[in-house]
Amino acid sequence: MTYTTLNAYLQQRFGCKVYKIALDGGFTCPNRDGTLGTRGCIFCSKGGSGDFAQSRELSITQQLEQGKALVARKNSSVKYIAYFQAFTNTYAPVEVLREKYSEAVRHPDVVALSVATRPDCLPDEVLQLLDEINQIKPVFVELGLQTVHAKTAAYIRRGYDLAVYDEAVDALHRIGINVVTHLILGLPGETAEDMVASVRYVCRKTDGIKLQLLHILEGTDLADAYRAGQIKVLSLAEYTAILRQCVAVIPPHVVIHRLTGDGAKRDLLAPLWSADKKKVINTINKALRE
């Protein structure tokens, strides 16, 4: 099965090995601060999906240096993408965003900026800022869509309609921003056909895609539903089979940024098989080669 990996894309674009350093900009989310809700999406961890990011107590430069130190143990001849990962990274006054983004792209070893956010948190002034930064170094905007199906979106408390995602992608493309779309495989009530339909839909628009296994993490409302027997999780075999179907409909020009993901082991309730990262990756790679 032929597809375009993130590693191959970055190597071609930047001419070297590129690692992402996950950062915590100290932001929150409209689904947590009371604007839309206070408990977040039902699957979202207490770290705002930034459990592997550096500490928000450090400056952006300090976080980058800590991330570099971890990577340098494996490979010292690399460059980096500054990845604002935790919570909603365009949800702040534009002056605050400008300060943090600018500090990141000024770092001499950073070749690009990646910003994870919600499609409903891209007002005109933020789009203008992203346009400005994109003239300095390339910008990727990662949009947490998770599903195209309205019933599922309501269940997970996403808080915006599919049309908002469509409008955000169009607005970002108008200013030349590379868009990456996050989808979760295994959301409650969705069939394999539903998940493939989500992939087909976003691949008509997005430049890149992240496919994420649904994790049940302690401290989330999803964990309560799981303990009550209201939902089930995918087995490794089920996930791999669905993943094959999804990858089969992703065109070569859409870069696959992720084929799965691993929740923080200290918080992982299910599926426990996902904690064996080496086995999961080997199983996925073998299935996609067949």
Image (tube, rainbow, N blue to C red):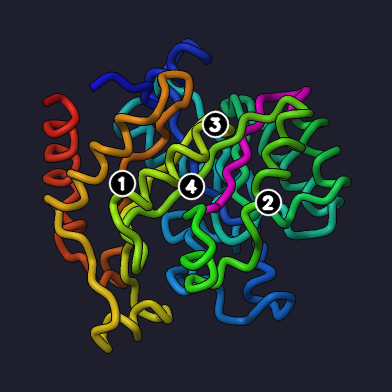
Q: Which residue is mark 3?
A: 204
Q: Which residue is mark 1?
A: 260
- In front here: 165 or 109? 165
91 on left or right of 265: right
Report helix, strand or loop for mark 1.
Answer: loop
Q: CA distance from mark 4 to mark 3?
A: 14 Å
- Residue 260 drawn at (x, y percent): 31, 46
Which badge, 4 or 2, is on the more N-terminal residue?
Answer: 2
Give the class, few, some or many, for how many residues have Cα within 10 Å of label 1's Cα (few <14, many ≥20).
many
137 on left or right of 202: right
Find residue 247 and report its image quarter.
top left
Q: CA distance from mark 1 to mark 4?
A: 11 Å
Q: CA distance from mark 1 to mark 3?
A: 21 Å
Q: Nearer the viewer, mark 4 or mark 3?
A: 3
Q: Amino acid at mark 4?
A: His
Task: Provide the residue span drawn in magenta.
Answer: 134-146
Give the quadrant of the N terminus. top left
Which badge, 1 or 3, is on the more N-terminal residue?
Answer: 3
Q: Which residue is mark 4?
A: 182
Residue 163 is labelled as: 2
Residue 143 is labelled as: none
Q: CA distance from mark 4 to mark 2?
A: 16 Å
- Residue 182 drawn at (x, y percent): 48, 47
- Residue 283 drawn at (x, y percent): 12, 40
Give the class, few, some or many, for how many residues have Cα within 10 Å of label 4's Cα (few <14, many ≥20).
many
209 on left or right of 194: right
Q: CA distance from mark 1 to mark 2?
A: 26 Å
Q: Amino acid at mark 3?
A: Arg
Which badge, 1 or 4, is on the more N-terminal residue?
Answer: 4
